[in-house]
Amino acid sequence: MNIHLPRADVTERTLAIVGELKELEGPLLPILHEIQDEFGYVPEESLPLIARELNLSRAEVYGVVTFYHDFREHPAGRHVLKLCRAEACQSMGGDRLAERAKALLGIDFHETTPDGAVTLEPVYCLGLCSCSPSAMLDGEVHARLDEAELEALVAEARR
Amino acid sequence: MTVKIYIPRDAAAVALGAEKVATAMAEAIAARGLDATIVRNGSRGMHWLEPLVEVETAEGRVAYGPVKARDVAALLDAGLLTGGAHPLCLGKTEDIPFLKRQTRLTFARCGITDPLSLDDYRAHGGLRGLEKAVAMQPAAIVAEVTESGLRGRGGAGFPTGIKWKTVLEAQGERKYIVCNADEGDSGTFADRMIMEGDPFVLIEGMAIAGIATGATKGYVYTRSEYPHAIAVMTAAIGIARAAGVLGSSVLGSAHAFDMEVRTGAGAYVCGEETSLLNSLEGKRGLVRAKPPLPAHKGLFDCPTVINNVISLASVPVILDKGAAYYRDFGMGRSRGTIPIQIAGNVKHGGLFEIGFGLTLGELVDEIGGGTASGRPVKAVQVGGPLGAYFPRALFDTPFDYEAFAAKDGLIGHAGIVVFDDTADMLKQARFAMEFCAVESCGKCTPCRIGSTRGVEVADKIAAGIEPEKNRELLADLCNTMKFGSLCALGGFTPYPVMSAMTHFPEDFEPAPRVEAAE
């Protein structure tokens, strides 16, 4: 959801999350995951707070956020549809399915529909390679997809 | 007696509707007042039959599949609870040829037990390896693993016992066991299946590794793309801790060992061990130069064992049944069994564990049953996105580390992806470069820049621009990446590219260029 949280909320929640997890060994990734779970993305205003609390530079934290494909710097659509683009899915027509999804949604990979409903993302392997092609809609996995099932998934996501 | 009905919780089964089947089954059991209970097991690995529903009968387990939610009523009408006849009935599970032909050591329990029942785990031979280990000297455990001939199942094939010995002998106040569960290779899902289907075997393997090397803390680093595995693994660790399998006194011994799950964030390169260690430390997943080896300076600069899921999950059976038992399976220097993942355009896809030595042709044609599309097999990629494409002419290659290396390939994490004759090998070569460009950590130039240039050169060949010169350039670029890259990502991307070009040269001949008419 495109929730625009008031700044104070981001600060407060970020500090709470960091406080909860900072005693872990190597806490930065768990913290970033938690923040993304909370806000749907990693808000820019979280970064200096995380850096201060973990005694890192802002550049280090920014470097980590941008290195990993999972972390978003902006909110995603209400639903995230991930299509596997790796070889096993290619062997079963994954590329055609991806083109169909793009056409249905009118967007390319890494884009969100103008109504904010769906973000389309590539994923390189969901480990469902024996029942390709596969996709993940908001954390739910779907395998052996054909065009009709993809259309149903897209329709579900657009609602 | 209450009848047990098994409906897998494995992600592949769930992706094919197992959740809906389980819900429909539970509702039908309640509505009909039947004396039956549903167990959510792991997958047996016959993914073309998923969701595979099994029922425990006096004669053994009887399988039905693939079952859809709408089949549930008819199945119960046909006498599912007593193994009644129905068009979806596959007979006794153990007699299904795909299962019968296997030697399941690492996957002995996967699909059979309730993954989150420690009692079930014990009842099926679990914890015997750890029970032996707590009574042994660390060096004796290491010797047992060394003698078993177990080699790293992540792909590199390095002897596991040697790695453990190095960590055992390394000086350090703290040592770590890190399980590489960052299974990012397309065509592989063995790690995921173990974590979802028999998580205690991985916990047991890691605890044994801890006792053998003096490490007291373990991490399972897995992928965010595997939410089901994360959930089961995390729950299993909690159960093991509550039961005293983990904690300050492992099985009541003087050894302490505890562990936790850590989740990556969508970076393929973090499957490379040094990149994984950086990621665990909360850094960017940049590859580290070796030496120092992780065994000397690994996680937080401490001596660290870093092993693949399957390597660690194979340790309990080695300790339980002895090194010789495990070593007697296999061929040449590839000892024991290997869980082969048959994937892509294949009729019978799934997990097939057997001693090393079966030929690629037997795996694809006999066990896999050929393509799902019914068209001829064109190529098989073995070992993930960094593995070579094999043509039918090389189908006599036995599944063995050295035999594959001799054919300019690798078995990697033992995933095989089948392609039919519609595959365009130039496109596949281009994808290998594109994938490398997307996933490169950026530390070394051959990988970071070479992959992007590789995509461009492949595009030129496809467009018919100086094809001969560009094929030479692509080969030269592959040579630079192979010998100049810091890790296997840049270093092995040439395998799919060069094998595609060598074995399928016709796909690298551009279509005659159509001259513009106007």
Image: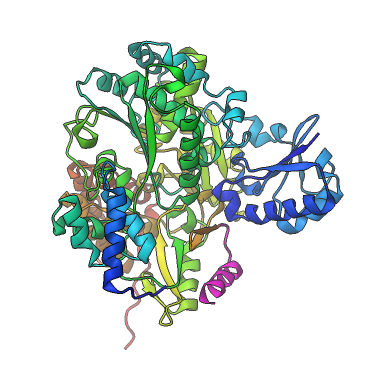
In depth, the one of A47 and B345 nearer the eye is A47
* Image location of residue B281, percent across then percent down: 24, 43
- In the displayed structure, would residue A49 be above or below residue B246? below
In the image, the segment drawn in magenta is A143-159
* x 45%, y 38%: residue: B414
Instruction: Give residue B90's quadrant in the image.
Output: top right
Q: Would residue A134 be visible to someone looking at this image?
A: no
Examine the structure image and report whether residue A58 is included in the region drawn in magenta: no
Q: Would residue B351 be visible to someone looking at this image?
A: yes
Instruction: Give residue B407's quadrant in the image.
Output: top left
Examine the structure image and report whether residue A145 is included in the region drawn in magenta: yes
In depth, the one of B325 and B125 nearer the eye is B125
- In the displayed structure, would residue B413 be above or below residue A132? above
Placement of the C terminus of chain B among the 4 image quadrants:
bottom left
* x 24%, y 42%: residue: B487
* Image location of residue A52, percent across then percent down: 16, 56
In depth, the one of A31 and B506 nearer the eye is A31
The colour scheme applied to this rendered structure is rainbow
Placement of the N terminus of chain B among the 4 image quadrants:
top right
Q: Please state if A84 lies on the left or on the right of B59 as rendered.
A: left
* Image location of residue B4, percent across then percent down: 73, 38
In depth, the one of B102 and B502 nearer the eye is B102
* Image location of residue B55, percent across then percent down: 75, 39
* x 61%, y 29%: residue: B120
Q: Please state if B259 lies on the left or on the right of B328 as rendered.
A: left
Type of secondary structure dominating the magenta stretch: helix
